[in-house]
Amino acid sequence: MKAVESRAEVYFMAIQPLSKAEKEAVIARLLEDPQLGEDILDLAVVQQRQGEPSRSFTEYLTDKRADLQPVKCFHRAHTVPGLAIRAH
């Protein structure tokens, strides 16, 4: 076990005997820090989506571009270059 994993295990074991209210207070306190809270939420999303198939960045961009449609000018029938809105 690496030092980081060992230290994480110590902290994890320290909160195990706490009551539900105390655990919630610890988690709430961790989430109060903006950067730490963002890191925790990012890790939760990664954990939650771990079983999903991966795809290339190119495939992602292709899908995103397909979701966009050109915006038409109010008084003209042509589209505005570079301006798009998300399709609903």
Image: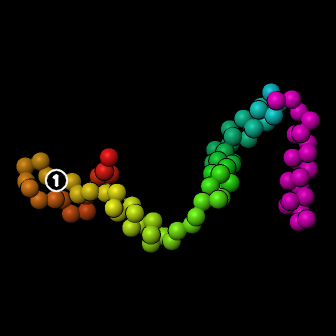
Q: In this rendering, does residue 35 appear at all?
A: no
Residue 25 percent location from the top left of the image: 77, 31
Residue 28 percent location from the top left of the image: 72, 35
Queried whether the magenta region covers residue 15, the answer comes back as yes
Q: Quarter-wise, where is residue 58 in the image?
A: bottom left
Over which residues does the magenta segment extend? 1-20
Q: Residues within 10 Å of mark 1 (few under 14, many from 20)?
A: some
Secondary structure, mark 1, is strand
Residue 15 percent location from the top left of the image: 87, 39
- Residue visible at 62% across and 55% down in the picture: 49
- Residue visible at 66% across and 45% down in the picture: 37
Queried whether the magenta region covers residue 9, the answer comes back as yes
- Residue visible at 44% across and 69% down in the picture: 59
In this rendering, would 46 be left or right of 78? right
Q: Is residue 33 above or below residue 76?
A: above
Which image quarter is the N terminus in? bottom right
